[in-house]
Amino acid sequence: MMRLPANKNTRVAAFAALGAVVMVGAAYASVPLYNLFCQVTGYGGTTQVAVGEAGEILDREVTVFFDANTNRSLPWTFEPAQRSMTVHLGETALAYYTATNNSSQPVTGVATFNVAPYKAASYFSKLECFCFTEQTLQPGESIEMPVLFFVDPLMDEERRLDDVTGITLSYTFFESQDGASASADAAP
């Protein structure tokens, strides 16, 4: 009869260990899985990355508004070159943002982005964007950064998006953690 409690304890310990391993694995995989979920669904305003043009241009138009923000710790001025543009669904468009490093040392920044309304985010596709890579600006340097995009014509088939006449593309620049050490190394 003494064996039964030992086996129960062993089973409980094994299940507890298995549970701990599964939880650690889930925690480790949660960020990549969440990012994949956002990219596939457009959740949280995540846009799509396109590999080619839409192929079809519709008569329906939307106005794309451009927004620019910087984190307080980033010594940059960052703004859109245009406040808005009207595009046809499927039409490839090119917009620019301008960034200036206001500090006396090189600074590397990285941009995060989203689209509002969220329900339209999965139809906003970028072909090229400064947000795909880090940007390093030398002291006092200003650069124009392009974003090449289109609004997928499939948006016109979604009845829940019939009311969408405007889409806001918003970027926020942060100082890159990787670039911060590179910036310090590059300083004279």
Image (cartoon, grey):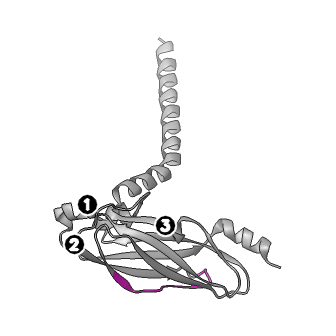
Q: Residue furthest right?
A: 188
**Residue 33 part of the magenta-drawn span:** no
Q: Earlier in the sequence, mark 3 or mark 2?
A: 2
Q: Which residue lies under the disc numbered 1?
A: 154
The Cα atoms of the two marked residues, 3 and 2, are separated by 24 Å
Instruction: Name the spot of residue 135 as percent of width and height, x first.
Output: 62, 72
Magenta span? 73-85
Instruction: Name the spot of residue 10 as percent of width and height, x first.
Output: 52, 23
**In the image, 146: left or right of 54?**
right
Instruction: Name the spot of residue 5 as percent of width and height, x first.
Output: 48, 19
Q: Of the residues tagged 3 and 2, which is closer to the observer?
A: 2
Q: Which residue lies under the disc numbered 2?
A: 59
**Residue 58 shows up from this direction:** yes
The Cα atoms of the two marked residues, 1 and 3, are separated by 20 Å
Q: Is residue 11 above or below residue 23?
A: above
Residue nearest the observer in this picture, 2 or 29: 29
**Residue 2 shows up from this direction:** no
**In the image, 29: left or right of 91?**
right
